[in-house]
Image (cartoon, helix red, strand yellow):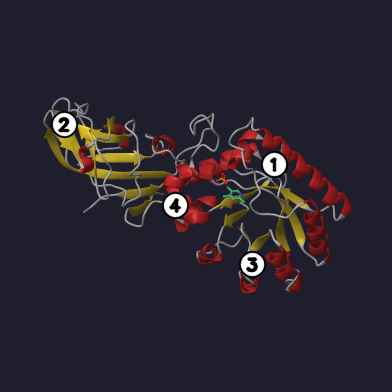
Amino acid sequence: MRTATVTIYPNALAHNLSQVKKLAPTSKVLAMVKANAYGHGVAAVLPALQQADGIGVASFTEAFEARQLGWEKSIGLVEGVFSANEWQQAIDYDCSCVIHHQPQLDWALTHVPSPDSATRSVWLKYNTGMNRLGFDYQQTITAAKQLHQAGFQVILTTHFANADDREHPLNALQIQRFDEMLTLLKSTVNEDIQGSLCNSAGLVNFPDYQYDWVRPGIMLYGSSPIIDKSASELELQPAMEFSARIMALSTVHTGEAIGYGSRWIADKPTKTALVSIGYGDGYPRVINDEAHVCVLVKSKTEDSEQNHQSEQDYESYLCPIRGRVAMDMIVIDVSSVPDDITLDSKVVLWGDSPHVDDVASQAGTIGYELLCRLSARPARIQTL
Ligand SMILES: *Cc1c(COP(=O)(O)O)cnc(C)c1O
C-alpha cells in the first residue's frame, strides 16, 4: 500500500492550547480552526480543543461541520456572513459573526436574533491599519451605537498586519488605535463592550494587550508565529507528522543525473532511496538544496529479551533530497544511513524533525501554507 500519511497528535494540540492560556490567563480563547483546522482536519482537532471557549472559522460550511461534529460552544465566523440568507443561517446555527461592512450591519439590524441566541454577540471589526476588512473610526462608533441599541453584545476586534515582527512601527499604532477606540466605546456606548486584538503572534509579542478574547491559530498547531523564535523555543509541539516510507533503494553512478530536468548530478557513487511522496500529496515542489527529510531505521539491539519496539528503538538520520520533487515521489540521498535501511523504513517529511517551519523556509513560504495545502491523498491517522 502507498504510505503517504498525515498523523495528528491531539496531546500536542492540548499542550499548545495550555501554552496560549499561560500567555493570556484571563482572556477567553477563540481557537482558529479555519481552512480545515490549518490542514489538520476539524474532526481531528476538536476533541483536543475542549478547553477553548470557542472556535473561529472562515466559512459557514466550516461552522456547519463543527456543529455536525457536536461542537456546542461558541463559533465565530471571522469574515462574517456573505448574504442576508447566511445571516439567517448563522442565527439557526448559533454562530457569532464578524461585522465588517455596511451590508452585514444592515442584515444584522433588520433581523435581530432573540435574546438567548449566541448570534446576539457580534464582533465589530475596526480597521486599525491592515486595510483589508473593517470600518473606519467614525463608522465604528456609529455601528457600535446601532448594534448596542438593537440589543447586540459587541466585541470590538481588529487584526495585526505585522505582529510577527515585534519592532515593526505599525504594531504600536494599531494597538493605540484599538485601545483608544475600546476606551471610547466603553465610556460613550456601553461599559460591557469587549475587546479582541491578538492572533498567535500578538499573544507572544504583546502580552500586555490580550483583552477579553484571544484568537490563536498557528501556534495551536505547533508552528512558531514570530520571526525571531522557533517553535521549540516557544515550547510548542508540532500537532502533525507528515511521513511516508521507502519504496525502492538504488545506487546512482558518478556522472548520472536524477529525476526530471536531470537537475542533480552525482559527483560520486550515491546510495539513494525513493520515497512515495510528492507534490500530489502536498510536499512543496519548489524547495531549495538545503531541504532534508528524516529517515528512521531500527537500531540494532544486543538485548534479545527486548522484543518491544518503541520509537526510542529507532535511529534517525537527516537525508538531503536529490533532484526535483515529482508528483508522486522524491529521491533522497541515504549515503549516511547504515546498511540496515530497508524498504518500508519510515521517512518524516515534517514533524519533530525536520520542523514544518524549516521546510517552509526552504520552500520560500510559511508553515501555514504547507499545512493548509496538503492534498486529500495522504492517509489520515489520529493518535490517542
Ligand atoms: C486566522 C486568524 C487568526 C489566527 O491567526 P494566527 O496567525 O494563525 O494565529 C486570528 N484572527 C483572525 C481574524 C484570523 O482570520
Height in image: 268 above or below 217?
A: above
Among the two numbered marks 4 and 1 on one chain, the one whose residue lies closer to the N terminus = 4
Cα–Cα span, label 2 and label 4? 34 Å
- Rendered image quadrant of residue 129: top right
Nearer to us in this view, 381 or 32: 32
- According to the picture, the residue beneath numbered tag 3 turns out to be 94
Q: Residue at x 83, y 46 (%)?
A: 183
Q: Give me the residue at 81% from left, 62% from top.
A: 148
- Mark 2 or 3: in front is 2
Indicate the quadrant where residue 291 lies. top left
Instruction: Identify the residue under disc 2.
Output: 271
Judged by depth in the image, the label closer to the viewer, 2 or 1, is 2
Tag on residue 39?
4
Q: Amino acid at mark 4?
A: Gly
CA gap between label 1 and label 3 equals 25 Å
Quarter residue 26 falls in: top right
